[in-house]
Amino acid sequence: MEYRQGAFFGWHVVAAAFLLAMFSWGINFYGPSVYLHALHAREGWSTSLVSAAITLHFLASAVVVASLPRLHRRHGLVTVTRAGVVAMAAGLAAWGAATSPWQMVPAALLTAAGWAVTSGAAINAVVAPWFDRRRPAALAMAYNGASLGGVVFTPLWAALIGGFGFARASLVVAAATLLVLWPLAGRYFGRGPAAFGQYPDGAAEAPAPRPALPPAGPLWRQPAFRSLSLAFALGLTAQMGLLTTLFSILAASLGAAGAGLVMSLATACAVIGRTAVGTLLPPGFDRRRAGMLNFLMQATGCAVLALAGGVPGLLVGGAVLFGLGIGNLLSLPPLIAQAEWPPEEVAAVIALVTAVNQALYAFGPGLFGAALDLLGGWAPPAAACLLQLAAAGVLARR
């Protein structure tokens, strides 16, 4: 990413944030399912035991991410991001080296710290200073790295573990993470537009200041914040739980190869849906309404999956509708926060929303897995449909 003097540097920052998201989601979001399978196969530990450590990973991250704006103010983006990269790499190595169940606890705490300071709230903190009017498109591009993390890292993990074993594979990925992200953070995250004599969006002048808003008190006491955080927590719990069980649901009718192809299609649809919203969302459009429409689209897809009865065309169609909304559950909360809160409060809003989301969706895989075992393949998409309808209703409340 060579910088040409006079060019707007913000798009270079977006490209760097894209890479950060790709590594972070590949290791901390998509990776845990790989760790579960690898440790179960190598050590013989039960699925529930490893799943408990993965739940700890997400819950501990929720605690840390709530303090992210304060950490950024005190230590700066570069230092905090680099500390997260080191924690992520060390935790990954610890997951691979675990030979006793208790060793998963420090591994989970390390990857939790890395996930907290390199995930959604962190990506927004990196990109937001550079964009105002074009922030939806910029965030969509940066967050697409999260989807690519699933596309790239899942087969990469399989190849590395098959060739070297889990312990050595984790060391290879940890080393690559440090080599790529440590210098990247220093080069692209350390300065804002003013350091280059530039303004957000590459404009010729600073954006017009927004009207001053009266103090609204602590976030938890604001109905707008409560509805925003609860709505996306419900939606992400549905999404996390259904994604965990979707392969098994599809494989029952489509076979393993067919299920893999449809899962890849859903991931590709996530990129398409996020990019479409980021580039086509009209400037004056109510962003909460966009979120409600997204929940309703996913709910429709889940209803199709629940009623498919094993019909391949319906399974594919339901997965596509569900997949088109996956990416927007990550990118829409920052855009809603930008429209509804003063600029100085946006980082705190996003960090706390992220913490609430992670604290709830950490339980999604276990709950949806139990529903699949007890009730059959219709139950997880039906539960996801109900949660997403509830999320749409909650988001409508101001």
Image: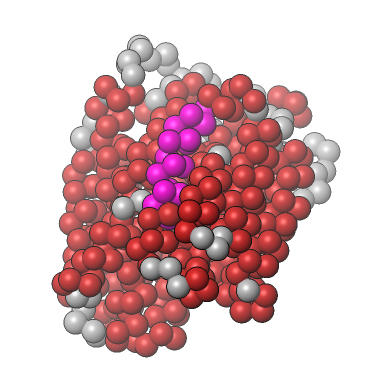
Question: Residue 44, position in %: x, y?
Answer: 45, 73
Seen at 61% across and 79% down, the residue is: 162
In the image, residue 215 lies at what x, y percent?
36, 12
Nearest the eye: 94 or 249: 94
Image height of 157 relative to 291, above or below = below
Q: Which residues are magenta?
A: 54-69
Q: Nearer the viewer, residue 320 or 257?
A: 257
Residue lying at 72% horizontally and 57% vertically, measured from the top left: 175
User: 329 or 89, which is in the foreground?
Assistant: 89
Q: Quadrant of the C terminus?
A: top left
Q: Is residue 163 magenta?
A: no
Q: Is residue 369 left or right of residue 42?
A: left
Q: Give whichever of 251, 212 is nearer the camera.
A: 251
* Residue 183 visible in the snapshot: yes
| Numbered label tally | 0
Q: Is residue 305 above or below residue 291?
A: below
Residue 57 colored magenta? Answer: yes
Q: Position of residue 161 (x, y in %)?
A: 61, 74
Residue 346 can be seen, yes or no: no
Color scheme of the displayed model: secondary structure
In the rendered structure, the answer to whether residue 135 lies left or right of residue 249 reads: right
At x 41%, y 48%, the residue is 56
Residue 344 falls left or right of residue 126: left
Q: Position of residue 266 (x, y in %)?
A: 41, 69
Look at the magenta stretch and give its main secondary structure: helix
